[in-house]
Image (cartoon, rainbow, N blue to C red):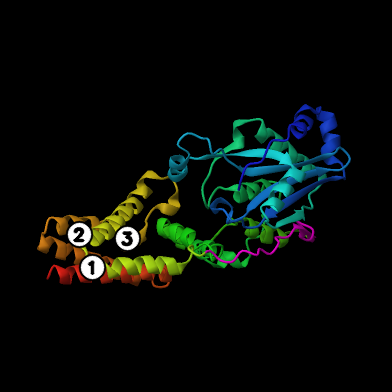
Amino acid sequence: MRSFTLSILTLFLLFTTTSSAQTNLLVSEQTEVSLLTCGSGNQLHSLFGHTALRIHNIQNGVDVVFNYGAFDFSTPNFYMKFVKGDMQYFVATGSYDEFIQNYQYENRTVYEQKLNLTPEQTQQLINDLVAVLSSDQKYYTYKFIDRNCTTMVAERINSLLKTAISTDIPDTKKDYRTILNSYLANSFYEKLGINLIFGAKVDKQSDKLFLPLELMEGVSKTKSGATPLASETVTVYEQQPSETSGSLWNNIYTFIAALALFVAFAHKKPVAIGYLAIMGLMGLFFALVGFYSFHEEVSANYNTLVISPIFLISLFFLIAKNKKGFRISVYICFASMLAFIGYAFNKDHFLLMLPIIIANTAILVRLLRKEKL
């Protein structure tokens, strides 16, 4: 989901063509509309793929890609805006050749589905896209599940159809968390971070096509009467096998090793203080970010039952040598983790949280014994 260089020539053709000439251009039988679906990349922002629309007219030499996933890294307070959920994405255009070259360079698969639209639907789509580009509608507030490059393209296509794109695909039988985790199998710390910050909303069963491969599958199953919405899916570029092996550090083993070191040296007060501080501050962030952010995915975060702000209270009592207060706060932590186990035992990220639960329990027990509580 990245931005592309604007194609000045293409924009000139689209915006300066007269009304009658534009009609001849767009309604031509040689005008094709395609859904482009791109596979996963190696960067966090590209793990879930990308969706775009291609408008191709051989007769007039127009071959442009409309990309709803553009954003500007130079936006002031970029990361704060992204976390808050008021980050503005926008529609950009680029040449088709440039688009494919970018994905070849990143070694990401690209699929194309030519849409079987009527000339009137094609005309309407192009008019709408050009209108969006020339107005404030080109900007939209990004939402991880509800409004992204895929959902925006799906809405644009659905606006042309009498029957909406089919959602009868395997993913809509799963919850959002399970779907997201299927893309993160080889990116452990990204998977851990996403599962920690996302709350109860992502445990709901999916009811929309919010990822590129889902939309591609939905389009392939959609018909308008007896006519399929799309021709067969064509692989424009196929990801080439990589010689690089798995990461030496981005895996569960390094994570378990780090937790084991904390457990092993928890009898040393600076280590215990550091662990309680880390867990407590992270828990405080996860508990409060839902009040700050407009992203519904980060609200109602029950993971704070394991990575809990209560660790900060335990830390305070430990430093103050208040044995009674420390003991009570530790018992509350135990009760919180038990509540998490009871609630999340059947959740997709439970095994991911289990090493943290074990480490928390071991360290708190050692501290209780060390302080003879």
Please state which amino acid type lies under the numbered disc 2. Answer: Ser
Give percent across and percent down for residue 24. 86, 35
Asked if marks 3 and 2 touch (Cβ < 8 Å), the reply is no
Magenta span main SS: loop
Q: Earlier in the sequence, mark 1 or mark 2?
A: 2
Decide whether residue 272 is among the magenta residues.
Answer: no
Mark sitting on residue 314:
2
Q: CA distance from mark 1 to mark 2?
A: 10 Å
Assign a secondary structure to mark 2: helix
Give percent across and percent down for residue 145. 53, 53
Q: Nearer the viewer, residue 155 or 300?
A: 300
Q: Nearer the viewer, residue 74 or 244?
A: 244
Give percent across and percent down for residue 323. 11, 63
Please state which amino acid type lies under the numbered disc 3. Answer: Ile
Is residue 11 shown left or right of residue 199? Answer: right
Q: Earlier in the sequence, mark 1 or mark 3?
A: 3
Asked if marks 1 and 2 touch (Cβ < 8 Å), the reply is yes
Decide whether residue 237 is among the magenta residues.
Answer: yes
Q: Nearer the viewer, residue 137 or 4?
A: 4
Give the residue at mark 1: 364
Residue segment shown in magenta = 226-247
Mark sitting on residue 307:
3
Assign a secondary structure to mark 3: loop
At x 32%, y 59%, the residue is 304
Decide: is 277 above or below 25: below
Asked if marks 1 and 3 touch (Cβ < 8 Å), the reply is no
Residue 232 in sight here:
yes
